């Protein structure tokens, strides 16, 4: 899930053992396995990973395993690479496969079954509905992809803001909306799925109207939000943008007490991110230990301020500004993962035909 404000260098991240006890060298154990390898958990994830070193150090102190994070683009690129390398896994586990790509990962035989030793009861509501998929993928966090608006812009222009997907195709909002594309962006795909959920077989007609009303497409979230959005860093000219329900708290000006933006909760699609053990993992024990850790309060508590997503453990208290301004949708749009798997490629081809005209 490519979230706002999450940054990560392309280089691999490694967190060593506490107290200067990191495993070094390339010694080989009696069974021919690299000692360094067996004490390291390699996590294949998306480029939005941003968990601080101190959290991973807590895992190291608890288990003795180090963590090496391998970014692999967005969730689509991550899933594709896991499929292409399944005969020679690039990691021990994966994190970031979401409900839009879960079926593909499971159907391709990328994952091995594993259920964490302990999970919060609230996590069950985010489990995949298919038992086979649920056995292989553990819910870690969730977030709502929603249309966001620049409240200040609409107030200054004395224009009532849009509230629903229907509003975005009205003449009053012509040339005001920007969204990342569905073929190149995880939130962009989520928005396409929101329109599928809302309009059913009529979604292509909606997209034709949306494009005719001047909607702008970008390759990714950062281009849409940071460049084209009026409340983004680039001070663009579009006051309506596709982003997240967690975006508004980060638009509170210095010295102010409320955001300059808000999320339209009637436009949201819910994404859930999962962790899973890879078949053929070199360090399955370490991977299982880290999946266990990701469901612990230590990891769950760190999610909002670092990964900008909501923890699936509802016992974890959210940061104050999240409780006030990062409201999740009471009735988000959803599409069953099996339906997504069966239609994703066809929907994307149709979407591409419409948006390329």
Image (spheres, rainbow, N blue to C red):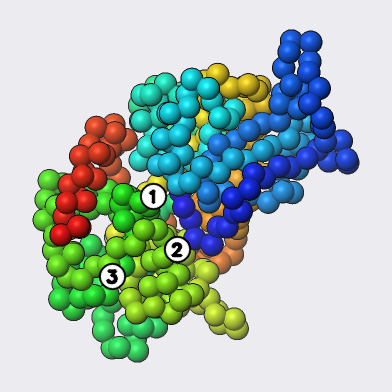
Q: Is residue 81 left or right of residue 295?
A: left
Q: Secondary structure at mark 2?
A: helix
Using a 10 Å C-alpha cutoff, classify the residue at mark 3 as few (fewer than 14 neighbours), some (14 to 19) or many (20 or more).
many
Q: Is residue 281 left or right of residue 235?
A: right
Residue 26: name its quadrant.
top right
> Residue under circle 1?
186
Label located before the other in sequence (1 or 3) = 3
Q: Residue at x 88, y 40 (%)?
A: 20
Using a 10 Å C-alpha cutoff, classify the residue at mark 2 as few (fewer than 14 neighbours), some (14 to 19) or many (20 or more).
some
Label located before the other in sequence (1 or 2) = 1
> Residue under circle 2?
222
Residue 31: name its quadrant.
top right
Q: Are marks 1 and 2 in contact (CB under 8 Å)?
A: no
Q: Residue at x 32, y 35 (%)?
A: 337
Looking at the picture, does residue 69 appear above or below residue 224? above
Q: Nearer the viewer, mark 3 or mark 2?
A: 2
> Residue under circle 3?
177
Q: Is residue 281 left or right of residue 207?
A: right
Provide residue 356's location: percent of width, then percent of height.
19, 57
Provide residue 102's location: percent of width, then percent of height.
39, 34
């Amino acid at each position: 899930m490519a979230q706002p404000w999450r940054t990560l260098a392309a280089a691999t991240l490694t967190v060593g053992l506490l107290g200067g006890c990191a495993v070094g060298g390339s010694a080989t154990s009696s069974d021919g396995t690299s000692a360094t390898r067996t004490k390291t958990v390699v996590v294949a994830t998306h480029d939005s990973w941003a968990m601080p070193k101190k959290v991973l150090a807590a895992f190291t102190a608890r288990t003795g395993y180090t963590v090496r994070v391998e970014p692999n683009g967005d969730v689509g690129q991550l899933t594709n690479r896991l499929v292409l390398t399944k005969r020679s896994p690039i990691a021990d586990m994966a994190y970031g496969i979401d409900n839009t790509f879960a079926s593909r990962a499971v159907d391709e035989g990328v994952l091995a079954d594993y259920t964490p030793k302990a999970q919060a009861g609230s996590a069950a509501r985010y489990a995949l509905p298919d038992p086979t998929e649920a056995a292989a993928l553990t819910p870690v966090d969730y977030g709502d992809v929603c249309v966001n608006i620049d409240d200040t812009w609409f107030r200054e222009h004395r224009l009532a803001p849009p509230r629903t997907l229907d509003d975005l195709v009205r003449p009053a909002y012509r040339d005001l909306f920007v969204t990342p594309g569905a073929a190149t962006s995880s939130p962009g795909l989520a928005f396409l799925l929101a329109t599928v959920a809302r309009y059913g077989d009529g979604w292509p007609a909606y997209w034709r109207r949306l494009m005719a009303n001047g909607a702008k497409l970008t390759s990714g979230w950062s281009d849409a939000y940071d460049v084209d959005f009026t409340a983004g860093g680039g001070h663009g000219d579009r006051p309506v943008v596709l982003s997240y329900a967690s975006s508004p708290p980060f638009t509170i000006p210095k010295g102010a007490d409320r955001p300059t933006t808000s999320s339209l909760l009637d436009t949201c699609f819910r994404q859930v991110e999962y962790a899973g053990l890879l078949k053929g993992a070199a360090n399955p024990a370490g991977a299982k230990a880290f999946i266990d850790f990701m469901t612990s309060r230590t990891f769950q508590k760190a999610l909002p301020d670092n990964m900008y997503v909501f923890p699936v453990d509802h016992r974890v208290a959210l940061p104050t500004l999240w409780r006030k301004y990062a409201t999740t949708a009471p009735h988000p749009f959803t599409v069953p993962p099996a339906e997504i798997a069966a239609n994703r490629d066809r929907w994307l081809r149709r979407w591409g035909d419409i948006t390329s005209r």
